[in-house]
Amino acid sequence: MNTDIKRHIDAARQVLVGVVPNPTSQIDQITNALIYKFMDDMDQAAMRAGGDASFFVGDLERYAWTRLMDPRMGNQERMNLYGEALLKFSESKQLPELFRDIFKSAILPYRSPEVLGLFLKEVAYFDYSHPEDLGDAYEYLLSIMSSQGDAGQFRTPRHIIDFVVDVVNPSKDDRVLDPACGTGGFLVSSYKHILEKHDGPSEAERRRDGKNPDGTSNSEKSLTPSDRQVLMKNFEGYDIDPGMVRIAQVNMYLHQFRNPRIYQYDTLSMDERWNEKYDVILANPPFMSPKGGVKTHSKFSIQSSRSEVLFVDYIMNHLRPRGRAGIIVPEGIIFQSGSAHRQLRKNLVEDGLYAVVSLPSGVFAPYAGVKTSILFLDNELAKQKQEILFVKVENDGYDLGATKRPISKNDLPGALEILKAYQALSEVEMSDGVVSLAVPRSRIAEIGDYNLSGDRYQVAIDYSNAKYPMVGFDEVVSTITPPVKIPKEHFNPKGNFPIIDQSQNDIAGWTNDESALVKSEKPVVIFGDHTCAVKYSEKSFAQGADGIKILLTDDRLIPKFFYYILKTKPVESEGYQRHFAKLKRYKIPLPPLEIQQQIIAELDGYQSIISGAQQVVESWKPRIEIDPEWEKAKLGDMLDRVGEQVDPQKITGEIYYIGLENIESGSGRIVGEPTTNYEQIKSLKNVFQPGDLLYGKLRPNLNKVWLAHRNGICSTDIVVFRVKQDAIANFYWYLLLSDDFVSDVMTGIKGAQLPRVGYEHLKEIILPLPPLAIQQQIVDRIEAERALVEGNRRLIEIYEEKVKQTIARLWEE
């Protein structure tokens, strides 16, 4: 999407905001005006080609956009004409039914001629000769509202749509579906793809007597009128959002589909169209599931409440015997361990899947940083192939920042070449450095989780006994000086460009100052001079003014390989002082580039497992759905406050001491080493015993709650509760960790220097008191979830150790 579209949409919104403050209403006003403008553009194009107008004729002629925008017309007259036009459009029998339906609910909700005049000037920028602008504008408006991200819907960049379509290669006889069509991008791209296949030899080919560049004959045949008639009936799209359906219908109409088959239809919950089958299905379905999961029916082959699982299952079930599909999926589909995800991958491996293309994580920026892959299915090809092809796209031709600037690195053409060779049953070779790997289906099935991450199956070169030259830092690394350093007070919470400093945060803030960007043709490694923090960046960023070094490697050292070395064998910190001089004394092992690449692939595989497990660990919270029928009581009636204290200075020996720093927020795990000596503790402390609940009463530690399993003492900033007989301690542990309880506590916070909650407020908070049997059921469920989370935590430890071992082998003789 070009920046002019964003600029004119933003300007239109700014004009409207004073008279149409509701963002949803702003979307309606802008899209209605765009459709109005495009109707007139189509008439003008038809007349320039020697034809007749079809929209603004007869009674509607006076409402044509070109007349509406006549500079001799005053704004009051223009507003009157515009308001009349909206009403006439909804009633006029000469307009196609599609446009009558669109304008049925169209109104002008304000009466400011000046505002309308300014608004229509911004809309006048858009032109029917670029019909995709309508979909781009609509999706940009949704992104501003964040309604796409909330539903897990993210605008699919056009170059990714075109890549998927080129791989799947729909033909003029194929019946094509997008079951989550949004604004119709996949359908329009497929239509254009088919037209290009039948537009005859190009000018260059005609000069070569109709020959292709490789000397073969160009056998393209133009579409007959009968072909075009069938083609118009072969494209269908579903979407649950009526706004999306409306834009998709107009988008298709602008591409010559006079009766577009775009339906408002809940693909996952409705079954009226279940028996429909298609030759080609293309989709970027929503990634997020509604609260409580998707409500669906029993016709799916996998019973799940996850929308991403159900959409892939739906597509598999609706392909004809020789059907093909291209599906963009989140990384959870690739490796998540849930039973539904695992069963889906098993079904894919055994039936239809022939290739997985991994996309870079910034493809959907600025809407989301979600990591995605593309699944390619071909029921016929999969029967002939005993392997699944994995292709890794590291660069898609654009930087991974919010502005999506074109860059020279683009793996998509090479990836397409590899996939085409695989489809033709030819030997797959590396193309333009794109990493690909064909893995036997039997190997993928071996472990039983059917993991679809290509890095997992890379066969690493045995470098454990190799000797690699050790080179000095200055031999292979140089530094980049930033154009400007941004002071911390100028860090913004939002913006177009990330700011990187030497903190442990990947992104410290945001800026809109393009002149501050550090730009590099290759990725860079970032070193915190004072903190020794190490970061890796593949996109442009601004430097925070607090002492980072931007490191650029030469052609003998791959940046990511250098990053893994520094991250795994870091410079030892000597406190808050400069460490770059110490880093410059660093000796770096320098294997051949091929081996560096193999090591990166191995470590990326480990890191993807670590990242997936970290996502589970960091996002899990114990949750209790409160039944309004349960009895309720005050906290003070269910939990006794324990007031026993001890003076550590009067006792000797070791003691189990819990401070707020020892309780992990949100999970209630113990971190650090709580065992200490009494003489190290200087003041009175609270006493606790097994089964007591320890609750942190200082903000921001209100979600620090621990259920004691042994005797000990704790900080007086921690309240000790003892559960009464008619309650289960674990149940109230999880309840006190909940966001709802924290919200109740926040209403009683007092104190400016050290905000805290007092017992007098805590004891009055109303808590649910379900029967003991239900308390136990809830505890059992949460404990089962916690066990899975702990398994993921252990997985992180195992694979972090594998990373260390892999790097350590580089130093072995």
Image (cartoon, rainbow, N blue to C red):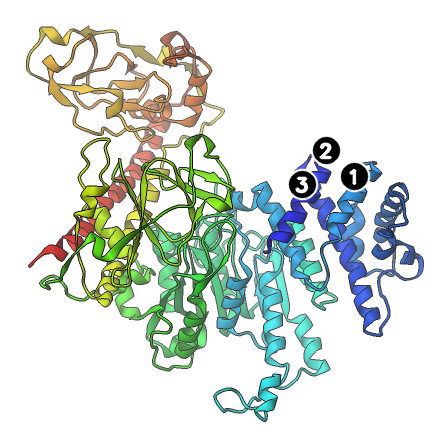
Q: Which residue is mark 1?
A: 115
In the picture provided, is 783 more to the left or to the right than 403? left
Give the distance between the C-alpha atoms of the residues marked 3 and 2, in whole angstroms: 14 Å
In the picture provided, is 675 more to the left or to the right than 129? left
Q: Are marks 2 and 1 in contact (CB under 8 Å)?
A: yes
> Residue at horizontal 48%, vertical 72%?
167
Q: Nearer the viewer, residue 183 or 71?
A: 71
Location of residue 12 by image quarter: top right
Q: Nearer the viewer, residue 187 or 80?
A: 80
**Residue 210, visible in the rendered structure:** yes
Q: Considering only vertical position in the picture, is 19 above or below 608?
A: above
Q: Amino acid at mark 3?
A: Thr
Q: Tag 2: Cα neighbours inside 10 Å, few (<14), some, or many (≥20)?
A: few
Q: Amino acid at mark 1?
A: Val
> What SS does tag 2 mark?
loop
Q: Considering only vertical position in the picture, is 709 above or below 520?
A: above
Q: Earlier in the sequence, mark 3 or mark 2?
A: 2
Q: Position of residue 146 (x, y in %)?
A: 56, 42
> Residue at horizontal 72%, vertical 39%?
15
In the picture provided, is 134 more to the left or to the right than 290? right
Q: Which residue is mark 3?
A: 24
> What SS does tag 3 mark?
helix
In the picture provided, is 371 more to the left or to the right than 796? right
Q: Tag 3: Cα neighbours inside 10 Å, few (<14), some, or many (≥20)?
A: few
Specify the quadrant that holds the C terminus.
bottom left
Q: Nearer the viewer, mark 1 or mark 3?
A: 1
Q: Nearer the viewer, residue 751 or 689?
A: 751
Q: Earlier in the sequence, mark 2 or mark 1?
A: 2
Residue 18 circle label: 2
Residue 670 circle label: none
Give the distance between the C-alpha atoms of the residues marked 1 and 3, in whole angstroms: 18 Å
